[in-house]
Image (cartoon, coloured by chain):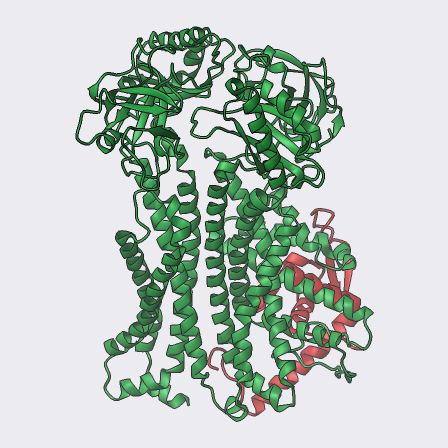
Amino acid sequence: MVMRLTPSHFHILLSAVQGPVHGYAIKGEVEKRTQGRIKLGPGSLYWAIGKLVDAGLLDETSAPSEASEGPSRRYFALSDAGRDRLEQELQILSDIVDLAKSHGLVQRPGEA
Amino acid sequence: MDRRSDRWWRLLMRLYPPDFRRRYGDSMLDFIHRQAADLQHSTFPARALETARTVLDLLLTAARARLAALGASGAGLSLRQGSTASSSVPASTSTPPTRPRSSPMDRLGQDLRYAIRSFARRPALTAVIVGTLALGIGANTAIFTVVNEIVLRPLPLGEPERVVDLAAKVPGGNSFTGFSYADFLQYQKHSGDALEQISAYTARRLRLGPDLEGERIVAQLTTPEYFQVVGVEPWIGRLPEPQGEPNAAVISHGFWQSKLGGDPKAVGSTLHLNGAPFTVVGIGPEGFSGTFIGYPTEVWLPLRAGEMLLQSFDLGDPEMRGLEFIGRLAPGVGLEQAQTALNLLASRFERLDPARNGDLRVAVHPTTGIDYSMRSGVVGFLGLLMAVAGLVLLITCLNVGGLLLARAAARQKEMAIRFAMGAGAARVVGQLITETLLLFALGAGLGVFVASRLTRAILLGLSDLPAPRGLGLGIDWRVLLFTAITAWLASLIAGLFPAREALKQDLVNGLRSRQAAPQSARLRGAFVVLQVAGAVALLIGAGLFLRSLQAGQSLDPGFEADRVAAGRLTLVLDEEDPELGLLRMQEVRRRLADLPGIESVALAQRPPIGVIKNPIEIDVEGMETPSGGALVVDANSVSRGYFETLEIPLVAGRAFGPEDRPDSPRVVIVNETMAQRFWPQQAAVGQELRLRGERATVVGIAGDSRYLIQDATPMAHVYLPITQDPSPRASVLVRSTGDVTKRQRELREAIQPALPAQDPSPFMTLRDDIDRSLLPQRLASAVMSALGSFGLLLASLGIYGVLAHGVNERRREIGIRLALGGRRPQVIRLVVASGMRLVLTGIVVGAGFALALTPLITRFLIGVAPLDIPTLGFVTLVLLAVGALACWAPALRAAAIDPAVSLRME
């Protein structure tokens, strides 16, 4: 069964595009990117990460060499399946946006 | 982030299924640490908000994870996790699986999942509701924890229901404080029908260490039967041998932990008390510290050890009274039966030897941990606190109920769709109940956390006050059960109305209209009125106690209270040789008076003012009470120099002098009130009265002073010379030019040669002593102020909520008014008036609530009536101000409505 992606899942995957990241960094990036619309607490973040790892979309990796943080810090990277899935989702989104634009439906943010 | 809060986080993690916890527990903790570090420099509210958000996130996700774990093991439940209901889900390629017919458990699972999702979608509202509940339930739980510890939880004794306190009672007597050892032997021998075992004991404060400079600890000197009576075995070691081991000590578990650092070699070691060496033979079980809650015993010594530790402590002396009895009822014997048997015994002893036994009686009371004479006061005070907590819970429920009602109104459309799609009423109500229960379960869970913090704060606050110590204030099953039941009842109250609203749905209108049902708005208004009323009642209570505290602190006692310090000591008096006691007292006074800066010294049976009356029966020729009963007046036994020391004026006659000896004719001094009441037409000096059957002459009249802290009404008071009415416990009163309380050691050293091995309690000015007695007022005003402010905050949020909602609903109407030429100040007035109507109704109802609390409060009030106009006025003003503030924002918003926009909206 293919896993359904929620907005949080989607944004978590997006945060891992640049390379391995740890949990707290994901939270910060997602918050920044969505301007605080999606706030991840420790529970929801790791619950979502757990789902993504189980679905094979994220891999747990060792820390990047430059990071010398504590041993308990865990890093997550996008798996190949994850990258494919993300591209697929982005494609769908971009199609929808194109469709909306062709109908003149897309407004400037904040206008709605 | 400190270690303690780490413990709490880890506790929260335990809510997760074990495999998830193992997998990500540490990472989540690391997350929390990082977040805390990031927030280090933020303001307190920001940090608190973030912490609340994190807790909520952990709780909700834990519930989701648990459900998923359940679903994974259960049959037929689809495993669709995550917030699939979120509106902005990126397109998904999966198809929802077909759902099999659901069983009740499945339905509960669905309801729970749905509830979690719907709460997660509105985190702010959810956090406000859960936070409010946590504070309300937490305050209740904290107060219940105190009640549980003091009243409900049985003492850790073997078969505690069989253990009884046996109090010495002499009708009409005032200076009798206990039994003699001879009494003990007599009762031990003959009380077998009623009591299986009886033990005599006396509690003393002894100094720890080889000299007399160490810390004072509480020791109980007991006969060997004590541990059998209370049904307690030592945790380690043994009890002292019944005979011949006067140097053996049993220490309490608490003492072992706190003073000996839990030393494993404590048993067998030597302990110095008042300079005398004792061998520790055993350690009591954990949690056992005698039979007085708040006054833990630290060491138990054989009663015989008293003869070595304390001068003139002679068990062979039948006049050495001051022992207390504790007994274990014989199997199958009830309290009344035991009382009857002991009454019979007492009259038999009286007949056998009237001189020795007199009219001594033994009163049987269950051993509850609170002295019988204080029990009704303590229970009354705790009852008041519980009533206050109940009021806070009511406010909380109404507040949350109002929020849920608003939520229900906003969900009308959703409900209508559910009904339209064929959902049964039971199913919809079931969903609502599940949601409410989930909220309250979250609130209760956090409430227990809040309560544990609050009880810690209470203990911390108490440690600065002359309050009971050694309270554990643990959260046990009783507390948890109480919290669960409270939360459940509260959820019923708060959830009932929203559910009813949902059922009253009109399908067509529900789907079509955007207006909330008018009943719902009226209901929310009623909720706000009751919240205001609750807050008003709490604040009135707080105000009354604050004024009582003030009145108590600034009361004019009618004597010098600031420059006179009092210390208590034990004057072991010997009736065989009254001269000796007299000489000792004179010696104490002389030695203290010789100290530099000391102006005057006196002794008295009790301090000049207190909270308990000291009644004595008297007979006066030609005087009768209306009921024909005995005349009762307040009494004190005082030494020479008493009136001079306290600067109480002598209105007529003389003070006590050296001529008032134990064997000279009895004399008394009365106060002005007594003189006027008993001999209104004649001079009181020279009159006679009978005291305990003996004739006594009035030799002087002293000015009135205040005798009871809580009562200013003038009362008849009689002074007896302490030489003729000796008392084993006495207060030493010292008036000085400087602050004598800084010279404790000097005072002690002056007393010791006169009364060897005597260790008076620390000297304290009478003003401070009065202040110490104001503990109930101090606690009540603190608790009620805190809870009242919380209630006020909730009520003002409630007012704001109702008005803001109302303004939103009436945008169109207000728009029309403005379009028709209505002026903005009028709109403001309209909104503020509708808000203030709620506030004013609330104030009136609240004053009614406060009146209903009067019977609980009155006994603790000092110098202020339960219906105190200044308090009422002040609270009214505060409420009006807060109410106006809460109205202001919605009113401004209403005035800012643009008619053009609001009219186009529909």
Q: What residue do we see at 61% from left, 26% from top?
A: B298
- Report the side of B164 relative to B763 (left or right): right
Place of residue B492 in the rendered image (x, y in percent of width and height, measured from the top left): 57, 69
Q: What residue do we see at 59% from left, 52% from top?
A: B449
Question: Which quadrant holds residue A10?
Answer: bottom right
In this picture, is B539 found above or below B663? below
Q: What residue do we see at 63% from left, 18% from top?
A: B303
In this picture, is B155 found above or below B873? above
Place of residue B291 in the rendered image (x, y in percent of width and height, measured from the top left): 60, 33
In this picture, is B668 found above or below B895? above
Place of residue B565 in the rendered image (x, y in percent of width and height, measured from the top left): 36, 21
Which residue, as the protein is rendered here, is positioned at the far left?
Answer: B681
The green chain is B
- Report the side of B487 relative to B578 (left or right): right
- Report the side of B745 relative to B452 (left or right): left
Q: What residue do we see at 76% from left, 78% from top?
A: B103
In the picture, the quarter occupied by the C terminus of chain B is bottom left
Q: Could one spot residue B863 in this view of the protein?
A: yes
The red chain is A
Which residue, as the protein is rendered here, is positioned at the far front?
Answer: B351
In the picture, the quarter occupied by the N terminus of chain B is top right
Q: Nearer the viewer, residue B44 or B701?
A: B701
Place of residue B434 in the rendered image (x, y in percent of width and height, measured from the top left): 63, 72
Q: Nearer the viewer, residue B684 or B488?
A: B684
Q: Could one spot residue B32 in this view of the protein?
A: no
Number of marks present in the image shown:
0
